[in-house]
């Protein structure tokens, strides 16, 4: 069940919309993104896509902001593979851009859980060029996992 939830999250976006009726994230990032889920297992998600023109920076390379948004998306999906009901709140995203990716270049995005605890989750996300397996970006995503409030304690009087 937890893998199905993570799969739906990647395919339809944060709120389950695939038709552009969602929020800013769904309309800007997800609609027509072409993100394919290649493999999913507990603690690991592997996706692939071609770099679309609309996600390029003025230098005609894959935009760092778009890369960061994909870190959030894939990292959150990794957390869902553990059966959690929420992906948590981002505390920190550290991104290292090591090389450039260009229009229509096939890339792979792999997220791996480093630690999923009671209140904190840490995920590593790597971006590779599919043709050479060369890493062009690497990120670490830390999220706070909100715990539901404890049930009220009933005492006898």
Image (spheres, grey):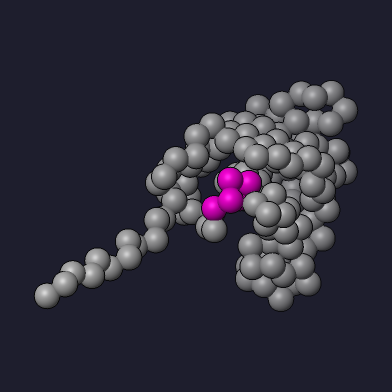
Q: Residue at x 74, y 42 (%)?
A: 40
Residue 130 occupies quadrant:
top right
The image shows residue 99 at horizontal and vertical percentages of 70, 28
The image shows residue 135 at horizontal and vertical percentages of 71, 26
The image shows residue 97 at horizontal and vertical percentages of 63, 32
Quarter that holds the N terminus: bottom right
Q: Is residue 36 visible?
A: yes
Q: Residue at x 72, y 70 (%)?
A: 17
Q: Main secondary structure of the magenta part?
A: loop
- Seen in the image, is 131 located left or right of residue 108? right
- Seen in the image, is 49 located left or right of residue 147? right
The image shows residue 90 at horizontal and vertical percentages of 48, 50
Q: Which residue is at the front of the view, 70 or 103?
A: 70
Residue 100 occupies quadrant:
top right
Whether residue 101 is in magenta: the answer is no
Quarter that holds the C terminus: bottom left
Q: Is residue 28 visible?
A: no
Q: Is residue 80 above or below residue 142?
A: below
- Seen in the image, is 54 located left or right of residue 148? right
Q: Is residue 30 above or below residue 68?
A: below
Q: Residue at x 79, y 55 (%)?
A: 33
Q: Residue at x 77, y 67 (%)?
A: 18
Q: Which residue is at the front of the view, 99 or 24?
A: 24
Whether residue 81 is in magenta: the answer is yes
Residue 24 occupies quadrant:
bottom right
Please report the bounds of the magenta region as a residue range: 80-84
Numbered label tally: 0
Residue furthest toward the front?
A: 156
Residue furthest toward the left?
A: 157
- Seen in the image, is 93 located left or right of residue 35? left
């Amino acid at each position: 069940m937890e893998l199905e939830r993570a799969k739906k999250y990647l395919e339809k976006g944060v709120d389950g919309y695939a038709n552009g009726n969602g929020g800013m994230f769904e309309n800007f990032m997800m609609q027509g993104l072409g993100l394919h889920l290649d493999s999913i297992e507990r603690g690991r998600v592997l996706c692939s896509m071609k770099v679309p023109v609309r996600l390029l920076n003025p230098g005609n390379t894959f935009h760092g902001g778009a890369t960061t948004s994909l870190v959030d998306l894939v990292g959150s999906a990794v957390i869902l593979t553990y059966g959690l009901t929420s992906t948590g709140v981002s505390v920190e995203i550290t991104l290292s851009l090591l090389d450039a990716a260009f229009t229509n270049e096939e890339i792979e995005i792999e997220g791996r859980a480093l630690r999923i605890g009671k209140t904190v989750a840490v995920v590593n996300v790597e971006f590779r060029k599919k043709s050479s397996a060369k890493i062009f970006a690497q990120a670490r995503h830390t999220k706070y996992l909100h715990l539901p409030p404890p049930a009220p304690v009933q005492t006898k009087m």
